[in-house]
Image (tube, coloured by chain):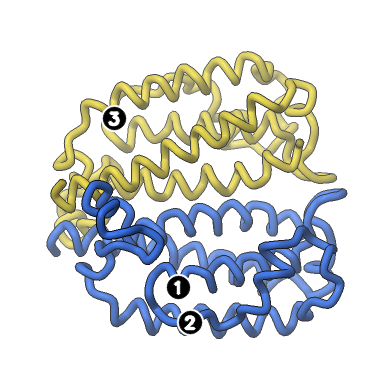
Chain colours: A blue, B yellow
């Protein structure tokens, strides 16, 4: 395997492993547990789940993989803090969105070549990218995996 | 920049960014706050800090970068759960170990070539590595960055 393909594999393996790890925890957590705060005065599990779906939805645009699947989640789960928006999807609805989104990512990733992974993401200009080639689509996966792990460390506290 | 060098930069940038991010939080947290549990009945901040230092210390061996700096941290912070070992370093002592360790890593990383990053880590045999070339030193950085972010998400709850 040539090293650039290897690099893509390593990064995507970590993303996939992180998604599977969170899925294991979500399977064990009930909807009632998700409605609780992760620590007194902090975000609820349901907010973190909605937040992750919304942030990952935003990745579609950055990765040039199509339009957002759930644009309605931006307001309650990215723009606003927890409990500001009272009308939000139920835990069951969010779980379904999460599963649908992850299936869609797998389909998209399976068709993405190594060259495409190392091409610029949509939030950087061609001029800037020529000087900063690390601002590519694979780097988006690296940073979003970090973010996913950060919130997974919080979600597990509900158990 | 050739793509393999780019891959190394992207992965190490994420590690460095994650370390800096935790440092920002540690600067704000007092030693008293670190002695508290991140959530009722869960690990204390001081345990998580000791745990991160111990896990990163173990990386030295995997990356073939020398002997452990703090082998005494294995027992209280990896082998045992929080509060099992009562005699542990103070928060101030752990902060000093953390800073010393991170400086040492920067020195080591500065001297590590791209080829060395893609070489096998010490816990995989040559035979297995020939079939699984993703089991390299850079991948250790990828997985430990995940782990670091996971526990950072927990430590920030002390604020």
Q: Nearer the viewer, residue B72 or B42?
A: B42
On screen, residue A44 above or below A112: above
Residue A13: image quadrant is bottom left
Viewer-proximal residue, A122 or B148?
A122
Q: CA distance from mark 1 to mark 2?
A: 6 Å
Few, some or many residues within 10 Å of mark 2 (<14, 14–19, 20+): few
Are labels 1 and 3 assigned to the same chain? no
Label 1 to label 3: alpha-carbon separation: 34 Å
Q: Residue A88 sits in which quadrant?
A: bottom right
Which residue is labeled 2 in the image? A67
Crowding around mark 3 (Cα neighbors within 10 Å: few <14, some 14 to 19, many 20+) is few
Please tell me the numbered disc located at residue B109. 3
The nearer-to-camera label among 1 and 3 is 1
Q: Could you tell whether B40 is left or right of A53 in the image?
A: right
Q: Position of residue B156 (x, y in %)?
A: 69, 40
Q: Is residue B140 above or below residue B48?
A: below
Residue A5 position within the rendered picture, expressed as x and y whole percent measured from the top left? 20, 64
Chain on which label 1 sits: A
The answer to whether the residue labelled 1 contacts the one labelled 2, judged by CB atoms less than 8 Å apart, is yes
């Amino acid at each position: 395997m040539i090293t650039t393909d290897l690099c893509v594999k390593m990064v995507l393996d970590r993303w996939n492993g992180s998604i599977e790890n969170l899925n294991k925890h979500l399977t064990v957590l009930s909807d009632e547990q998700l409605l609780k705060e992760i620590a007194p005065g902090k975000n609820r599990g349901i907010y973190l789940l909605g937040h992750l779906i919304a942030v990952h939805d935003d990745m579609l645009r950055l990765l040039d993989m199509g339009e957002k699947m759930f644009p309605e989640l931006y307001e309650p789960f990215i723009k606003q803090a927890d409990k500001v928006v009272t009308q939000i999807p139920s835990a069951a609805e969010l779980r379904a969105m999460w599963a649908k989104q992850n299936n869609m990512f797998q389909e998209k990733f399976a068709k993405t070549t190594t060259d495409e992974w190392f091409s610029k993401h949509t939030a950087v200009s061609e001029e800037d990218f020529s000087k900063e080639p690390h601002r590519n689509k694979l780097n988006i996966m690296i940073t979003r995996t970090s973010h996913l792990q950060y919130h997974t460390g919080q979600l597990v506290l509900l158990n």
